Amino acid sequence: MSQDRSVSVIIPVHNGADFIGTALQSLERQVEDRSRLQVVVIDDGSTDGTGDIVREHADRLGELTVVRNEDARSVGSARIQGLEAANRDYIAFLDADDWMAPGRLEHLMRRCEELDVDFLRTDHVRAFENGQPRELHRAPDGRRDVPIHTRDAILPAHSASMVDYPFPWAGIFRRRLADDGRLAYDEGLHSFEDRVAIWRLAVSDSTFAVVDAPWIVYRREVATSLTQVFDDRQLAFIEGFGLVRDILMADDENLVFESKMIRQFLAIAAHHVARQHGMHISTRRQLRQAIADFAKTLDVEPLREQWQAIGMTRRAQLGTAILPALKEKTPA
């Protein structure tokens, strides 16, 4: 029964003093017996007093484990440290500027056992710092309360699937996934780390279910978020796609998912090109060159197929970066 199970909540944070108090408060009412809760905070080089705020909540959080990096490493590295420190039956993630409704973790542990799956996924609510009304964002798979094999939820390439929903905090995971490497992160990725992890998990022999649950709230438009910066950390998606490509290429059975990966790459590359006006000119050049270089590593037929399918707007945004790869590989 879930009442006998415990959960580790992993929170990576860098300079999160403005929000982390709310995140920690939301964990105080997740389980009735707080001894069943471990909170693992990775203080990744914070200089704004984040660590002091975390310690103020120590007596209300069951077991509190704080891992301190004197210099910031990366979100990917912090998640690795969190998984290494987590010691409970289940693993959940929470970003320092988000929060959970009461009883969410208890509910998820119970449903995971009832459905006998490796992990669960849920919808989430988006809260905007600019005052825009909150939005409900649903998990892409419409099947609810039924076990699903992860490999059966990757395709089709042309529409949203569960690998397009990479948020680690939108669910809960059994500890065994981390123990055997199915749930794993990569050192040094400053962004895109969650998409690589979701792909790695998706092609594994695992099961999941999408369930309704008390909300988790994802705070958007935060000025300090990596989604709001325009420096070269945003180029991590290229390295991330390289890791995903290598995961797929390592097993011939995964080649069926290559078109999905390429479709994702084109969509995300177009997103970054569309926001390049906020980047320094040198970063813009790096972005274009990195996209072009990565495109040349892809198989031409699925690249050409997805290039034709992404639409005129994205083709116009990416043309100078992608077309050389297509021309180089066009048969004589």
Image (tube, rainbow, N blue to C red):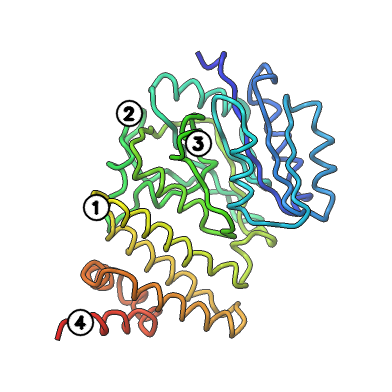
Q: Residues within 10 Å of mark 1 (few under 14, many from 20)?
A: few
Q: Position of residue 299 (x, y in %)?
A: 26, 69
Q: Amino acid type of disc 3?
A: Ala
Q: Position of residue 45 (x, y in %)?
A: 76, 54
Q: Amino acid type of disc 1?
A: Asp
Circle 2: element type: loop
Which picture quadrant has residue 248? bottom left
Q: Are marks 2 and 4 in contact (CB under 8 Å)?
A: no
Q: Which residue is mark 3?
A: 178
> 168 or 316, which lies in front?
168
Q: Which residue is mark 4?
A: 330
Q: Residues within 10 Å of mark 2 (few under 14, many from 20)?
A: few
> 213 or 94, which lies in front?
94
Q: Are marks 4 and 3 in contact (CB under 8 Å)?
A: no
CA distance separating discs 1 and 2:
28 Å
Circle 4: element type: loop
Disc 4 or 3, which lies upstream in sequence? Answer: 3
Determine which of the numbered discs, if any, sits on residue 252 in the image.
Answer: 1
Determine which of the numbered discs, if any, sits on residue 146 in the image.
Answer: 2
Instruction: State left or right for residue 15 relative to residue 174.
Output: right
CA distance separating discs 3 and 2:
23 Å
Q: Are marks 1 and 4 in contact (CB under 8 Å)?
A: no
Q: Are marks 1 and 2 in contact (CB under 8 Å)?
A: no
CA distance separating discs 1 and 4:
24 Å
